[in-house]
Image: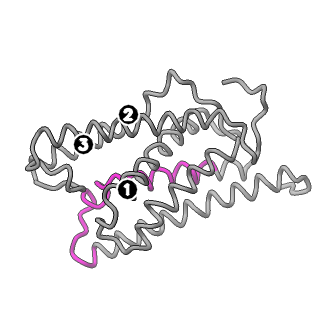
Amino acid sequence: MDLRTPHRRTEVAIGGARVAASGVVVVLLVLTYVERIAAGDGNPFNYFGYFTNQTNLLMSVLLGLAGVLVLLDRPAPTWLAAARGVATACLLVVAVIYNTLIPGTGTAPAWVSAVLHLVFPAVALADWLLVGDRPRLRWRSWWIVLPYPVAWLAVVLVRGVTDGWVPYGFLLPERGLVSLVAHCVVLLVALVAAGAVVWAGSRLRGTLLPRSPRAPA
């Protein structure tokens, strides 16, 4: 690994930071799950049924992979940038919804909630905007922010009317159909808006590892 050039040193620093941040979040999720098991509530479908936990785990894997590729000095595939874009948009919604509409409603310790609902989403967004090693995402692919959250919502709603478990109170079936539909629409609109922010952000060259202005969209 040649560290003689400033560019390569920057790459190594960014790759290492990505891997480290991802590792911290994965360890945090695992330790929190182990604590749930010790407390007698170790159902993995419940723990990973939270959109927060799912999305943080997904972003950890994707960001960690992006970091490894930078360390190996290998180009990231296009699908990885698209997947990171989707995960970043979802984390933005996690941060906004939790910190504005339902703050303090989680069962995890306050510092764990702060990492999952604020710190890591901020890290993911900063990485996306500042590091230019991702292509410009085509607006015609903007729709890909929706399939994963829609699938998550469908599973949660089915569970709500079958076994009675939902991760968030506003998705309880007893709140009525109108309330459920309204909340689902708000979530999906928020995701589309977050996707627009992420897709627009992909057009920035980035101050770290700036993309060539001639790079194709």
Q: Which residue is drawn at 87% across and 54% down?
A: 2
Q: Residues within 10 Å of mark 3 (few under 14, many from 20)?
A: some
Work out how far the residue at label 3 is from the one at label 1, CA to CA, in angstroms. 15 Å
Question: Which colouring convention does the figure follow?
Answer: one colour
Outermost right residue: 4
* Residue 180 percent location from the top left of the image: 17, 42
Outermost top residue: 140
Residue placed under numbered mark 2 in the picture = 146
In the picture provided, is 143 more to the left or to the right than 85? Answer: left
Is the N terminus in the top left, top right, bottom left or bottom right quadrant? bottom right
Tell me the magenta residue range: 37-66
Residue 105, quarter of picture: bottom left
Q: Which circle's residue, 2 or 1, is located before the other in the chain? A: 1
Work out how far the residue at label 2 is from the one at label 3, CA to CA, in angstroms. 15 Å
In the picture provided, is 54 more to the left or to the right than 26? Answer: left
Q: Which of marks 2 and 3 is in front?
A: 3
Q: Residues within 10 Å of mark 2 (few under 14, many from 20)?
A: some
Residue placed under numbered mark 1 in the picture = 100
Kindly identify which numbered label has been placed on residue 183.
Answer: 3
Q: Which residue is drawn at 11% across and 39% down?
A: 177
Q: Does the magenta stretch include residue 55?
A: yes
Q: Do the residues labelled 2 and 3 touch (CB within 8 Å)?
A: no
Q: Nearer the viewer, mark 3 or mark 1?
A: 1
Three-letter code, disc 1: Thr
Q: Which circle's residue, 3 or 1, is located before the other in the chain? A: 1
Q: Is disc 1 placed on a helix, strand or loop? A: helix
Q: Does the magenta stretch include residue 49?
A: yes
